[in-house]
Amino acid sequence: MKYIQLLLLALSITFISFAQTPTAQKLDPAMAIKKSKANNVTWLDVREDPFNLVGFEWIKQDNVFRRLPLNPDWKIREEVNHLANQTAGGQLRFKTNSNKIFLKVELAERSGMYHMPATGQSGFDLYVKENEIQRYLETTRFPHDTIQYQQEFKVGETNKMQEFIFNFPLYNGVKSVSIGVEKNSLIEKPSSFTQSGKIVIYGTSITQGGCVSRPGMVYSNILSRKLDTEFVNLGFSGNGRGEPELANIINQISGMKLIILDYEANANKTIQKTIYPFVDILRKKYPKIPILIMSKTRYARAIDGSDAYKTLISNRDFQKKLVVERKNNGDSNIYFLDGSTVLGEDYYECTVDGSHPSDLGSYRIAQALLKKIKEIVFDN
């Protein structure tokens, strides 16, 4: 009995000591989570006018924040169906003259990825658009174990009409999101994209945004800012396998001006079997839309001479050959980008865990794609 009492006493002392240990958030006010006081605020559902939602092609039909239709015409695997609820690449765009913007969110699940911060998994980024340039302002702060949070953003002092863009979470679903503005403030439609049409990217966790620090750093959002054009992110973590059902669903998206295929990372052993029929399906409906195939980026373990490097080069050469063959057969609008080189000579410094890009890696992918997209879409 005495032993148990001593053990309980030791545990209580340890708990008290741990609870009293200062944390960075307590020691540094800049890291603290600030409480939002939403007084005299008008709340609005972002699915209604005048808000503009990007990246959710079927939202008017299904009324949910989802990257694929709720009831697709082609049966998709359960894993893809689940990942479609994660809002990677989604954007909310609007104008307001409110000096404060409030964001109220309900997530599908709590955060908790071991190699990706909650800000990237479940957070929203806020950008302001000035003179056609998007400038980053802030990312939401919230306890990582919550599914509901609210935040206030101070965005002005003079009630000037400004344009804002929120980037949605990359690895979580969003059940609801509301925007709050100060009473009597105006809300207006955003300006149109400078470049019309949509660029659709089909890929893997790298496309979805694993494992960047915040939503604005997924490469599709970087490209959207750089080109001022609409992107549809169809990256499905671990499940970008080149299935024909996904090609058929992509064909349902209206207004496409470029399709990018970046799914080799989930199809090392099957890319050579799946990519021909995948492209064939796209071409049946859209014989002229440019298609860009990007081979897999180089992982840290793919050192020269290794089996990983040999597979990388073999699959790269196969995809490059496919593009050459199709061009020779009359498909002049198909292109190739060598993904093995896009991270640079120090490719091993560009990931979080040896394979998934950090912000640096994602930015380098975006830079390589930016150059290629400009050549394909804007220079022709």
Image (cartoon, rainbow, N blue to C red):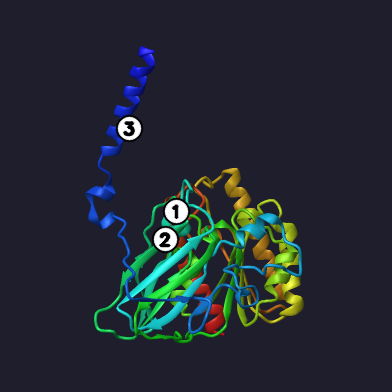
Q: Please determine whether, in this image, residue 30 is positioned above or below residue 221.
A: above
* Whole-number angstrom distance, CA of label 3 to CA of label 2: 28 Å
Q: Amino acid at mark 3?
A: Phe
Badge 3 element: helix
The residue at which mark 2 appears reads as 149
Residue at 69% from the left image edge and 82% from the top image edge: 288
The residue at which mark 1 appears reads as 146
CA neighbours of label 3 inside 10 A, class few (<14), some (14 to 19), many (20+):
few
Question: Can the viewer see residue 228 in this picture?
Answer: yes
Residue at 71% from the left image edge and 57% from the top image edge: 77
Q: Earlier in the sequence, mark 3 or mark 2?
A: 3
Left or right, 138 with respect to 112, comes to: left
The residue at which mark 3 appears reads as 15
Left or right, 197 with respect to 23, comes to: right
* Whole-number angstrom distance, CA of label 2 to CA of label 1: 7 Å
Left or right, 17 with respect to 301, comes to: left
Left or right, 361 with respect to 233, comes to: left
Badge 1 element: loop
Q: Amino acid at mark 2?
A: Tyr
Whether residues under marks 2 and 1 lie with C-beta atoms below 8 angstroms apart, the answer is: yes
Question: Can the viewer see residue 325 in this picture?
Answer: no
* Whole-number angstrom distance, CA of label 3 to CA of label 1: 23 Å
Circle count:
3
Residue 294's spot in the image, x, y percent?
A: 59, 65
Residue 355's spot in the image, x, y percent?
A: 52, 50
Residue 72's spot in the image, x, y percent?
A: 72, 68
In this orientation, which residue lies closer to the viewer: 221 or 312?
221
CA neighbours of label 1 inside 10 A, class few (<14), some (14 to 19), many (20+):
few
Q: Please determine whether, in this image, residue 12 is positioned above or below residue 304.
A: above
Q: Amino acid at mark 1?
A: Thr
